[in-house]
Image (cartoon, rainbow, N blue to C red):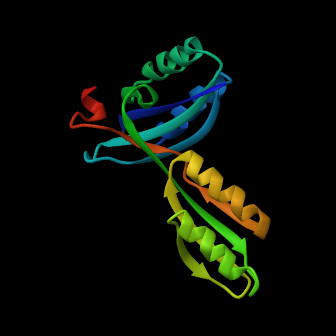
Amino acid sequence: MKRYLLAVLVDNKPGVLTHVSGLISRRAFNIESISAGYTEEADVTRIHIVVSVESDNELRQVVHQLSKLIDVIKIVNLTETESISRELVLIKVRATRETRADIINVVNIFRANIVDVGPEDIVVELTGGRGKVDALCELLQEYGIIEIARTGAIALSRGAIPVKEM
């Protein structure tokens, strides 16, 4: 399975995200992550979808089906262009007096931030690529992860040309 990151520009209307995700899941393609947010234009929403497919042909099917939706303005495969991709993760880790300093050291190595400290836990925030996020999660596993919240990937193309003009 190969992962692809698609940027989908859609009309900012109620139910569009449901239509997009429903279309992909009905076709039995796996959505690894999906995120949506406002753009520089008030009437346009940008949806980032990370899909896992077996082949380029399956990816073409996903893009073709999405392009049939009325509210879809533009679809760009950011995996195949020079782009900058990031993910945000919040990780709540068990922390005792004995382990707190070690956890802080790990957090500092990853240039992550501690955003909350409790008597028995620490909440860590990290922004980075998928590999960096996965590596931090793996290292913090030994201290006892209480819970994780991940945004999924978002991305921008490199250079002065925006996705809407690609």
- Any part of residue 26 in sight: yes
* Above or below, 135 relative to 94: above
* Above or below, 166 relative to 35: above
Residue 103 left/right relative to 71: right
Residue 34 left/right relative to 98: left
The quadrant the C terminus occupies is: top left
Q: Residue furthest top?
A: 57
The front one of 27 and 142 is 142
Residue beneath the point at 23% across and 33% down: 161
Residue beneath the point at 62% across and 34% down: 31
Q: Position of residue 23 (x, y in %)?
A: 57, 26
The quadrant the N terminus occupies is: top right
Report the number of numbered marks. Answer: 0
Q: Position of residue 2 (x, y in %)?
A: 61, 26
Question: On the image, which quarter does residue 120 sit in?
Answer: bottom right
Residue beneath the point at 76% across and 84% down: 98
Q: Position of residue 103 (x, y in %)?
A: 66, 74
* Above or below, 120 relative to 140: below
- Any part of residue 144 in sight: no
Residue 142 left/right relative to 149: right
